[in-house]
Image (tube, rainbow, N blue to C red):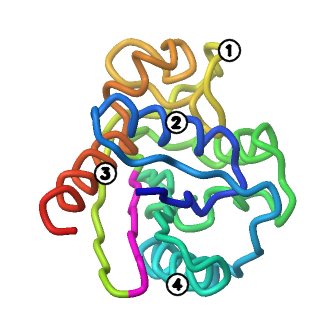
């Protein structure tokens, strides 16, 4: 089955499509360069993922997997959370988001945090939701050159996600957890 991954983020697409391949399933991930814009105005990452799945399906009429993810920092009451991509502003770069987070976390003693991904599958009839969580902590300085987003300041074990190879990151990632759950359900039920 061809499944459109509802993202404009090439890094997310590559990560999820690689996980799909590694699960040994028969589903082919599709990327659209000119994917429609969806206003992610929900109050939760689940609401955003669901809205994106429905709107993208209505536009292209092929099965869709959408995701929404966030970084939740405990001492900042869950921020940046739902607005992780836009934490420092609507068009903020990864570096601007990181700088703002480190500044806001500067006086806090608790650096515990987690990434959470919600995946939403919709094919015009079936709806499936899964989620994955990766627990770690925020470092005070960036480390590593791999990854994207907040990877260079999110420490899992003794390394940041940006210090891991893409294969190492994919083994433990919140997206892997959510994707494996989703593919298991799709393979059983659809």
Q: Residue at x 47, y 70 (%)?
A: 63
- Element under disc 1: loop
First of labels 4, 3 by sequence position: 4
Question: CA gap, disc 2 to disc 3?
Answer: 12 Å
Residue 93 falls left or right of residue 142: right
User: Is residue 119 located in the magenta-colored stretch of the structure?
Assistant: yes
The structure residue drawn at horizontal position 68% and vertical position 15%, both measured from the top left corner, is 145
Marker disc for residue 54: 4
Q: Is residue 14 left or right of residue 128?
A: right
Range drawn in magenta: 116-124
Please, what secondary structure does the residue beneath circle 4 have?
Answer: helix
Q: Is residue 125 above or below residue 119?
A: below
Looking at the rendering, which quadrant does residue 169 occupy? top left
Q: Residue at label 2?
A: 15
User: Which residue is identified by label 1?
Assistant: 145
Where disc 2 sits, the SS reads helix
**Measured along the vertical axis of the image, is residue 64 above or below residue 106?**
below
Where residue 24 appears, as percent x and y from the top left, is 28, 32
Pointers 4 and 1 in contact (C-beta within 8 Å): no
Q: CA distance from mark 2 to mark 4?
A: 22 Å
Percent position of residue 116, x then y: 39, 53
Rendered position, 187 above or below 164: below
- In this view, the residue in front, 151 or 18, is 18
- Mark closer to the observer (1, 3): 3
Give the number of the disc on residue 178. Answer: 3
Labelled disc at residue 172: none
């Amino acid at each position: 089955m061809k499944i459109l991954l509802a993202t404009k983020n090439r890094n997310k697409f590559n990560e999820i499509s690689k996980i799909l391949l590694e699960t040994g399933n028969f589903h082919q991930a599709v990327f659209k360069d000119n994917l429609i814009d969806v206003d992610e105005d929900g109050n939760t990452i689940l609401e955003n993922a669901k809205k994106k799945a429905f709107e993208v399906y209505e536009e292209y009429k092929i099965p869709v997997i959408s995701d929404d993810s966030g970084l939740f920092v405990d001492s900042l009451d869950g921020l940046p959370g739902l607005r992780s991509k836009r934490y420092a502003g609507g068009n903020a770069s990864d570096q601007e988001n990181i700088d703002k987070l480190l500044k806001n976390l500067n006086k806090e003693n608790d650096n515990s945090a987690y990434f959470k991904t919600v995946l939403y599958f919709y094919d015009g009839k079936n709806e499936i939701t899964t989620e994955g969580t990766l627990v770690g902590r925020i470092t005070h300085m960036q480390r590593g050159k791999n990854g994207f987003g907040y990877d260079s300041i999110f420490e899992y074990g003794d390394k940041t996600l940006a210090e891991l190879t893409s294969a190492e990151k994919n083994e433990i990632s919140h997206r892997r957890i959510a994707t494996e759950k989703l593919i298991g359900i799709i393979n059983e039920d659809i």
